[in-house]
Image (tube, helix red, strand yellow):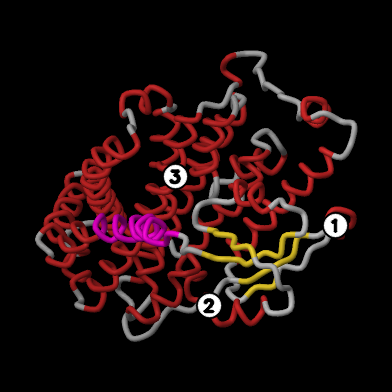
Amino acid sequence: MKGLWKIANWEITRNLTNKQFIIGLLLTPVLIGVFSGIPILLERLNQPSLSTYYVVDHLGELASLQALLPENISLEAHQDSASIADIVRDTNSSGYFTLDQAFISTGQIDVVYNDRSMETLSTIRGSLTALLQQIRLASSDISVNQLTFVTAPARVREVALDEELEPQTMHMIVALVFTVLVFFLILTSGTMLMQSALQEKRDRMAEVVLSSVRSVQLMQGKILGHFLLGLMQLVFWIAIGLPIARYFWDFSVTEALAAVNVPIILFFGLGGYLLFSALFVGLGATMEDLQSAGNSQSLVIMLPALSFLFMGPVMTNPDGAIAIFASIFPFTSPAIMMMRSGLTVVPLWQTLSSAALLLLTAWVIMLLASKIFRIGMLMYGKNASFQEVTKWLRYKES
């Protein structure tokens, strides 16, 4: 145990004094803020431009139609149908159309456009539909109140039989945020773990380290060290993100923590990290260079990413067969159990089964990874093949 903490402390100290780690720690929230803020900024800057349409109005409804349109769409009356196209071209207007009796009887109208703005055309389509309904309603014996009463949709309130069955929005938001954070922790820490193993193998530092500690202690120490590093990253980013979230969205931290099932989130988040980090460190021990590891890394990343394939079915049917399977299957249970706990009441047997299977799988993976790590860290010159890895798993440590 003493050697394990020495390895963990060495990994933490080495990375905290690494300029690249510090730059990444500070730069990551900036990049997240930039990429999340740019779409909002672009949406604000992308104000709709002024569009002008010429209208030949044989119905006298131009004013009524203009009242249905936003301020950025202007309608100009024109009397001569033959020359209206030339005027649109000369003035570089957006287009023209004709309001006549045929439109009322058939419901069809041609909007000739010179500026193909999908948003503007959609707005005009909706306003023409509303105008057509108003004119047809006025010529019938049905009053507006009668039509509103007949076509009113049903207002259905969904009331849970028991209070705990009702999904809590705050719980779902926090669970989703933690799911993304755990996935990011697995991705960043796993990559650092694999690169650390590769560097020590390439520099032949593993020979020196393994002469003083057992291979299992070395592997577990590296996992523990990088896990603590990942927690430092998350705490730092959360400390920056929470004040921003509270300022812009009035996000209550106290309410969020009270709404979530903290033990479930901590248990499955930690279990998922141990499972996938063992895979990463075992993979790093079988590779000879970063290029080979980068090609194989995507295969390991696909395993925690499987959870996102089940997000849709779980959100729509949290008690369905797919949701139950994804919450018990160990490679998807860390994320899915956190999500399901905010959507429904998960039966106790499912929670216990998922927890037991996750721990068992993580323990088996760590045992297998320790065997691969023990031999792979001392193998130089080539990448290990599948047959060689299979042989390593059958070796017995003396």
Q: Residue at x 90, y 31 (%)?
A: 141
The percent position of residue 68, horizontal first and vertical second, equals 62, 47
Query: In the rendered structure, which disc, 1 or 3, sits on the residue that comes first in sequence?
Result: 1
- The rendered magenta stretch, by its main secondary structure, is classed as helix
The reply, left or right, for residue 256 in relation to residue 246 is: right
Farthest residue to the top: give it. 162
- Badge 3 marks a residue whose secondary structure is helix
Residue in front for this viewpoint, 367 or 108: 108
Q: Which residue is mark 1?
A: 101
Q: Identify the mark at residue 91; answer none if there is no mark.
A: 2
The percent position of residue 362, horizontal first and vertical second, equals 46, 47
The reply, left or right, for residue 315 in relation to residue 378 is: right
Residue in front for this viewpoint, 15 or 5: 15
Residue in front for this viewpoint, 153 or 58: 58
> Which picture quadrant has residue 343?
top right
Q: Residue at x 55, y 52 (%)?
A: 308
Distance between the Cα atoms at labels 1 and 2?
28 Å
> Which amino acid type is shown beneath numbered disc 3?
Thr
Look at the numbered discs 1 and 3 and tell me whether their residues touch, using CB distance below 8 Å.
Answer: no
| Boundaries of the magenta span | 28-47
> Which amino acid type is shown beneath numbered disc 2?
Thr
Farthest residue to the left: give it. 17
Q: Is residue 397 visible?
A: no
Q: Identify the mark at residue 179; answer none if there is no mark.
A: 3
> Which picture quadrant has residue 11?
bottom left
Q: Is residue 200 visible?
A: yes
Farthest residue to the front: give it. 79
Distance between the Cα atoms at labels 2 and 3?
55 Å
Q: Residue at x 42, y 35 (%)?
A: 265
